[in-house]
Amino acid sequence: MSDVMSVRLHLSGVRVRGVLVDSVDRLEVEVESTREWSRCPHCGFRCYKVWDRRGKRVRDLEVSGRRATLVWRRRRFCCGNCGERHLEDHDQFQAGLTRRLARRLVADARVMSIRAASRHHGVGWHRNILGLVRAHSARVAQRRRARPCRVLLVDETSIRRRHRYVTVVACGDTGEVLAMIPGRTKGSLTRFFRDQGAWWCRQVEIVVSDGSRSYQAAISQYLPDAVHVLDRFHVARWFTEGLTLVRREIQRRPADQRPPTYEPDLFRARFTLLRRADHLSDGHQAHLDRLFDAHPRLRTAWDALQELYRIYEADDLDGANEALGRFADLYATGQIPEYREIVDTIIAWGKEILAYHSSRRASNGPLEGINNLLQVLRRVAHGFTNYGNYAARGLLVT
């Protein structure tokens, strides 16, 4: 019977001594190691003399819906060389769990909250599951960060919106998260670069970030030879702010008119106005043409936005500069003073914006998808208050 049970356990190096409890909801099996000796941790000699045996309870995977526990008859050996005594170890058991249960707990932590996984498997959430998740995440991060990275993606995400943020660093070559660092300051990114070392930093050819001056300072200090690209999605959002200001100014009605105090037709077109021209349907284009006939300044603002979009649509750097020149001509007419801040932004970040064409069109698109996964993780976990737990769980799901 013991040999049959040993086969069914599928644990190498483990022999079944007998079944202790076999009830409807619980199964307990007494096991022991098949290894006849243990190496002394004090002097390194092989020990064959068993001093005594002690029972240690080890949780295992459920069997047909029943919680399974292995009672390991753990031997204490006495060294024949130094006389010291020690307890044997087994590679199938760790921290009161079998290795396969530990792997299952880590896998469940990817899609469940820690407390839900704890209730499902009946193990402690803080000492067992969270400890396993942190240890596994540390190994994953160490393995990922040991490889060189050609394209580096940097962005921020919130652990608590408008209060606490983390800097997410990912490899653009593989799409894997390398680190989640508390804060969004220069010091946050500086710590990452210091930990990676000078050799690793020299391998980075392209780095993509948002328009953060803190990130820019850290990148220019530690990655001076890399091409710094400003993420096109953040830049496009800046571009749309000018047209939004023009629309809001045009749609306002005098205070003496009856409600609504804005023009409804213009308000309903607020999202259509922000689309690229080649993404408009015939109906949308006809709607905009009617608005442009009624408000010529709105057409000028819309044409200016389309020229800004063409900076990224251009095939090469020369085409981007031509689009930028056409935008400058529209701005020079004086009809769209709301674009003043956008002009200042282009002047301040022009090199990083145009670097999009010399970096094989690198963007933070993969990292934005990762941020969406991290927000889903926040909802699954019902929020986080600890940076370390958030980073450990984040590395698991990405």
Image (cartoon, grey):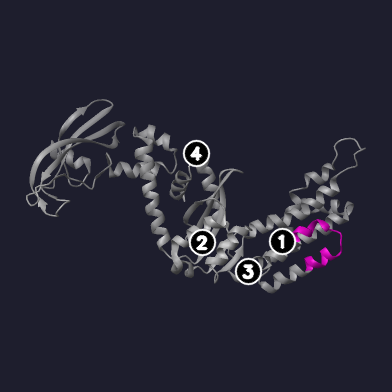
Task: Tell me the mark number nearer the camera, choosing from 2 and 1.
Answer: 1
Task: Name the residue: 79% across, 58% down.
Answer: 339
Q: Residue 75 occupies which quadrant of the picture?
A: top left
Residue at the disc numbered 3: 355
Sequence-wise first label, 3 or 1: 1
Residue 393 in percent (x, y) is at 45, 45
Q: Earlier in the sequence, mark 4 or mark 1?
A: 1
| Label 3 vs 4, first from the N-terminus | 3
For label 4, the residue is 380
**Residue 337 in magenta stretch:** yes
Q: Is residue 203 left or right of residue 368?
A: left
CB-based contact (under 8 Å), mark 3 and mark 4: no
| Sequence-first disc among 4 and 2 | 2
Q: Which residue occupies the foreground of this view, 165 or 368?
A: 165
- Residue 215 visible in the current orientation: yes
Local secondary structure at mark 1: helix
Q: What residue sits right under mark 1 in the picture?
A: 345
Residue type at tag 3 = Ala
Using the numbered discs, state the Cα–Cα distance from disc 4 to disc 2 in whole angstroms: 26 Å
As measured in the structure, the alpha-carbon distance from the residue carrying label 3 to the one carrying label 2 is 16 Å
Tell me which corner region of the image, top left, top right, bottom left or bottom right, holds residue 325: bottom right
Task: Point out which mark residue 172 bears.
Answer: 2
Residue 281 in view in this figure: no
Of the image marks 3 and 2, the number of the one nearer the N terminus:
2
Amino acid type assigned to the residue bearing label 2 in the image? Gly
Q: Which residues are magenta?
A: 326-342
